[in-house]
Image (tube, rainbow, N blue to C red):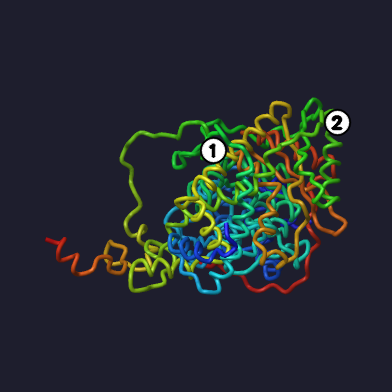
Amino acid sequence: MELYEKTAAELSRLLQAGEVSSVEVVRSFMDRIKKMEPYLKAFVTHTPGLALKTAAEVDEKRRRGESLHPLAGVPIAVKDNICTEGLRTTCASRILENYVPPYDATVYRKIKEVGMPVFGKTNMDEFAMGSSTEHSAFYPTRNPWDPERVPGGSSGGSAVAVAAAMVPLALGSDTGGSIRLPASMCGLTGLRPTFGRVSRYGLVAFASSLDQVGPLSVSAQDNALLLNLIAGSDPADSTSLPDPVPDYAERLSVDPSGLRVGLIEQNVEDGFDSEVIAAVKKAAFLLERRGAEVGVVSLPRTGYGLEAYYLIAPSEASSNLGRYDGVRHGICLEDETVESMFNRTRGGGFGAEVKRRIMIGTYALSAGYYDAYYLQAMKVRTLIRRDYETAFKKFDLLIGASSPTTAFKIGEKTDDPLQMYLSDICNITDSLAGVPSISVPSGLHSNGLPMGLQLTAPPLGESLLLKVAYFLEQEGEGPFPRPGSFTSEGGSLSDEA
Amino acid sequence: MTDDFSKEVEYVARLARLKLSPEEKAIMSDQLSSILKTAQRVRELDTTGVEPTSHVISVPALMREDETRPSLPLNRVLQNAPKRQKDFFRVPRITDRQDEETNGR
């Protein structure tokens, strides 16, 4: 078995035991990236030199006997909407294609501090607006299970980097499903933590009442290890939660007897792929056989979640993206007056989907429509939260599909925004409610593509989610396999600014 | 809502400071009208007496002591400026000369 095929936990153990060096680990992933990346395009910016440098430093510290974090020397990739000082952060947008942040996001600072070699910044839908990574201004990312298909989005680059074994771990961000959907479509474990559990300082803002940073990994244990590192309050993010952070990776095994599990009626709908639903029910049945109390739960108002989300998120985006005006950062398309410079820069710098959402949001917030659209959507959000509160009085954990279908074809939904928006239908309401939610692999579809199921817990229930994810993994054959490799001639790989 | 959304598109694009080509406007008009029609479904729910959720966290915002702390050095703040003049972001003239003469005194 090659080093690049190992989980983060296995690499951590080998590194701590001194059986391999971090430089060896990094070289193994470098070779893998050279082979896979030309086909998949998971990255916007590659930093193998930075990864090697970090690895050498970690190895040196280990030689000197310094005490190191369990993830020291374990490689990672970072979504390109997370600010990295001195390293280009584009949000996969033309308007930020030359932006080099003057500071680090808190999550990135933590990664650097413990010495995780960073392999680069991953591709995404522009400003995280999308469900397929096709809305990247640069190029789409391809699904390693079938390169004709999308990896899901918006954290598609992060998902593919892990699924294709180019890194063992990656950071994504999730506003309305952007970690869970690509995790589901690429056969990974992807966690959206409770709103406020992970600092968002330095995460480029899309919808501030919804955005969260979270881990993508091959196994539940790897996910827990990375969450351990990034969770916690941050003086630089006033919305981060002060609650103490438990050790998520400790004692992952759980006995499900007595656990009350609610199968979400709305997330196993008739319109969904029948094998996807069968896989969810199979997992619920397995939990029941091991002593869990499984019942059906209805979240009646979640049927309005998609509509509420596609008013609230664009409204917040239209405000957050007001800062891109060609004055302080990003590109500037010059013109005679300040206003015509704004108009040109924004019209030329943003892609079609971003402009669409700015337009929806501006409309929903404009005089005469605010009450009917934005305010009403925020009230519907309250009703949806109440549905969850009611459900969590009866159940400890909710289970449903992570996506109505497996990965769709590249180009299939790009001309029809509403169809694209529907891809997030299983993920959006957890986001609106602010509760933690995890997508875990639920099996291989007869079409050869991975399927996912989604577990949802009350606020700060990440431990339970990871334990049940671990249980389902152990009841299967361990972590879900990665797709078979491609054969290809790799190009050369060097650091980009 | 009428099907022809082109007037709204003009108006909203102006509010949002987005220069759109005629082709973009035509597509946007169709798409916005169908997206907003769908989104109108939120009005089906009776929300009488329901408080809006603008934020899911009920804990008070994290506060710290009001102490001065170092800020980023000016050079780094300005490192991404498309146009810079000394320690300023440079933009096209905002006031016309007439204003300047009147207000400058």
Q: Is residue A131 left or right of residue B21?
A: right
How far across and how far down the image is residue A413, in percent?
70, 64
Image x and y of residue A485, in percent: 79, 64
Instruction: Answer yes or no: are tags 1 and 2 on the same subunit.
Output: no
Q: CA distance from mark 1 to mark 2?
A: 38 Å
Residue at position x 62%, y 43% in the image:
A431
Residue at label 2? A290
The image quadrant of residue B23 is bottom right
Residue drawn where x is 59% and y is 55% of the image? B36
Q: Amino acid at mark 1?
A: Thr
**Who is closer to the viewer here, A451 or B8?**
B8
**Which subunit holds the residue at mark 2?**
A
**Viewer-proximal residue, A371 or A34?**
A371
Left or right: residue A278 versus residue A146 is right
Question: Is residue A161 visible to the viewer in this orientation of the structure?
Answer: no
Residue farthest along the front direction in this orientation: B2
Q: Is residue A291 left or right of residue A303?
A: right
Please give the name of the residue rendered at 75% of the width and 59% of the height, measured from the top-left corner: A407
* Chain letter for the residue marked with disc 1 in the picture: B
| Percent x, y of residue B65 | 35, 33
What amino acid does circle 2 point to? Answer: Arg
* Residue visible at 70% across and 31% down in the picture: A391
Query: Residue A73: where, in percent of width, then height?
Result: 61, 51
Q: Can residue A255 be seen in the rendering of this structure?
A: yes
Graded by Cα atoms within 10 Å as few (under 14), some (14 to 19) or many (20 or more), the crowding at tag 1 reads many
Element class at badge 2? loop
Residue beneath label 1, please?
B53
